[in-house]
Image (tube, grey):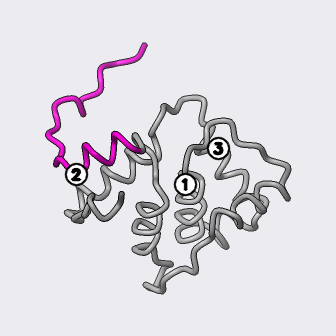
Amino acid sequence: MRRTSLTQYDEMPEAMVNYMRHYGPHFSRKLCEFAVSMMTKTGGSKITPYSKEQVKTILNRAGIQLENDQLHDSVYVANMCKADFLGSSVVDETRLAMYIRDVIDDPDGYDGIVFNRWYADMCYTGTAIDWEEML
């Protein structure tokens, strides 16, 4: 049973509404770059981000085709995994590709799940987003 989203009661800044009109609950290239720019490994060192082409290559090498990927969502997921799990519980790029698939094509997921989880983190941490810059 699908429940009514509580986000319908949120008041979005006009620039965010405009972003959503263009991209919906998904990462544009600019928003992905912004989100990834804040990612760090344990100890605070910045990651060297994967590009969209590098993520495609990683997925292809593992023989993985994503069914529900949109815009730069898989790029965000790949970089988040790189920052938080790669080299630890995700031991190599094949497992990274599997992780990306598990998140993007999660059968319990919904359209925009990656974006919405990230946005909830931004709200919780009080991180300001210049939505006009993300268009």
Residue depth check, mark 2 versus mark 1: number of the one nearer the observer: 2
Within 10 Å of the Cα at label 2, are there few (<14), some (14-19), or many (20+) other Cα atoms? some
Q: Tell me the amino acid under the disc marked 2.
A: Ala
Residue drawn at point x = 21 percent, y = 65 percent: 128
Element type at mark 2: helix
Residue drawn at point x = 52 percent, y = 33 percent: 109
Residue 87 inside the magenta-drawn segment: no
Q: Please report contact status of discs 2 and 1: CB closer than 8 Å, yes or no.
A: no
With 55 as the anchor, is 103 left or right in this view?
Answer: left
* Above or below, 44 relative to 34: below
Q: Which residue is mark 3?
A: 102
Residue depth check, mark 2 versus mark 3: number of the one nearer the observer: 2
Q: Tell me the amino acid under the disc marked 1.
A: His
Q: Quadrant of residue 127?
A: bottom left
Q: Which quadrant is home to the N terminus?
A: top left
Q: Tell me residue 64's x, y (percent).
A: 79, 47
Which stretch did the figure color magenta?
Answer: 1-22
Q: Which residue is mark 2?
A: 15
Q: Tell me the amino acid under the disc marked 3.
A: Asp
With 25 as the anchor, is 17 left or right in this view?
Answer: left
Along the viewing direction, whichever of 49 and 102 lies nearer the viewer: 49
Residue 19 inside the magenta-drawn segment: yes
Q: Which residue is mark 1?
A: 72
Within 10 Å of the Cα at label 3, are there few (<14), some (14-19), or many (20+) other Cα atoms? few
Along the viewing direction, whichever of 58 and 51 lies nearer the viewer: 51
Within 10 Å of the Cα at label 1, are there few (<14), some (14-19), or many (20+) other Cα atoms? some
Q: First in sequence: mark 3 or mark 1?
A: 1
